[in-house]
């Protein structure tokens, strides 16, 4: 028997712009996007929430944005050199501010009557071990049982990547397992060439940023998703599309 392949198509940056909101919901309505990540403090989050509440089957997670605390701005601006930033992350005051900000954003999400399917972070900053630990602590405390994880580290557009060593990856996986937090086995970033035919067995997350207008790379994601060839390949390959919520609610592990 051919091993099962499950794919979460997760749209990041919901709430960042009207164009992104339109692109994400259009891809959802076409049955392609299966989950999403909301920037609760995004300038167009209210617009996104209104649309979410009109679509009860729409899955949405919390896209924690810690960029201001790190001195990060778009496009690719970092106030501190990476060694200085890593040094800052080990200071107790930084821990307190990050914990407070995570709690603030999660509270804002919940107060709007939304149920989080998962948690991830803007620009993958939970790839830094210090932030990872604080995020997992919040997830455990709040009963959020799914999130994004990559044992290979995280590539960032226009800025230095966030590497994850094999030792760090093993530690992170152990922490997630002990806390009962589930995650896809593989993270696929369309910034790099990939083939649906080569998606491995188990659960994968395809992280996308679809947008109807705006940044060219976001438009490219949107065009990829709505191309009829994309979904026809998914069907031909027998890939099962799921959400983070379905990953958690499955009566048996999806492997």
Image (cartoon, rainbow, N blue to C red):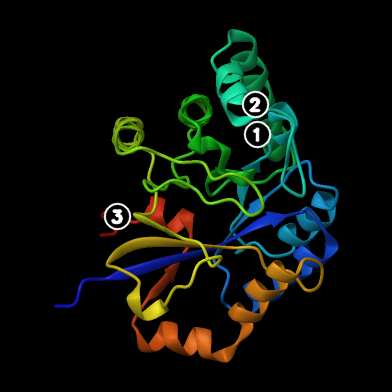
Asked which quadrant contains residue 99, the reply is top right
Asked which quadrant contains residue 14, the reply is bottom right
- Residue ID for mark 3: 251
Can residue 115 be seen in the rendering of this structure? Answer: no
Task: Determine whether, in the image, residue 183 is placed left or right of residue 118.
Answer: left
Q: Is the residue 183 above or below the residue 19 in the image?
A: above
Asked which quadrant contains residue 210, the reply is bottom right
> Which label sits on residue 106?
1
Q: Are marks 2 and 1 in contact (CB under 8 Å)?
A: yes
Residue at point 69%, 68% (across, down): 217
- Whole-Å distance between the Cαs marked 2 and 1? 5 Å
**How many numbered tags mark residues here?**
3
| Image location (x, y in percent) of residue 95 | 59, 16
- Whole-Å distance between the Cαs marked 3 and 1? 27 Å
Q: Secondary structure at mark 1?
A: helix
Q: Is the residue 211 above or below the residue 155 in the image?
A: below
Residue at point 60%, 87% (across, down): 227
Q: Are marks 3 and 2 in contact (CB under 8 Å)?
A: no
Which part of the image, by quadrant, shows the N terminus? bottom left
| Image location (x, y in percent) of residue 85 | 62, 25
- Residue ID for mark 2: 103
| Image location (x, y in percent) of residue 18 | 84, 63
Residue at point 67%, 38% (across, down): 110
């Amino acid at each position: 028997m051919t091993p099962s392949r499950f794919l979460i198509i997760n749209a990041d940056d919901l709430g960042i712009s009207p164009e992104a909101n339109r692109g994400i919901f259009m891809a959802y309505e076409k049955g392609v996007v299966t989950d999403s990540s909301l920037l609760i403090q995004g300038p167009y989050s209210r617009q996104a929430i209104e649309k979410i509440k009109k679509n009860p089957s729409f899955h949405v997670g919390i896209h924690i944005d810690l960029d201001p605390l790190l001195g990060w701005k778009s496009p690719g601006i970092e106030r501190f050199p990476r060694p200085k930033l890593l040094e800052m992350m080990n200071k107790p005051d930084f821990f307190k501010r990050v914990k407070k900000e995570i709690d603030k954003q999660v509270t804002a999400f919940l107060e709007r009557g939304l149920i989080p399917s998962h948690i991830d972070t803007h620009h993958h900053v939970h790839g830094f071990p210090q932030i990872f630990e604080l995020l997992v602590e919040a997830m455990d405390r709040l009963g959020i049982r799914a999130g994004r994880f990559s044992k290979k580290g995280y590539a960032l557009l226009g800025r230095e990547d966030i590497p994850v060593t094999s030792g760090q990856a093993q530690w992170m996986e152990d922490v997630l397992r002990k806390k009962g937090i589930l995650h896809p086995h593989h993270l696929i970033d369309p910034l790099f060439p990939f083939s649906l035919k080569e998606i491995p067995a188990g659960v994968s997350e395809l992280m996308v940023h679809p947008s109807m207008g705006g940044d060219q790379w976001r438009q490219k994601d949107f065009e990829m998703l709505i191309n009829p060839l994309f979904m026809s390949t998914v069907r031909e390959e027998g890939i099962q599309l799921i959400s983070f919520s379905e990953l958690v609610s499955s009566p048996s592990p999806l492997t």
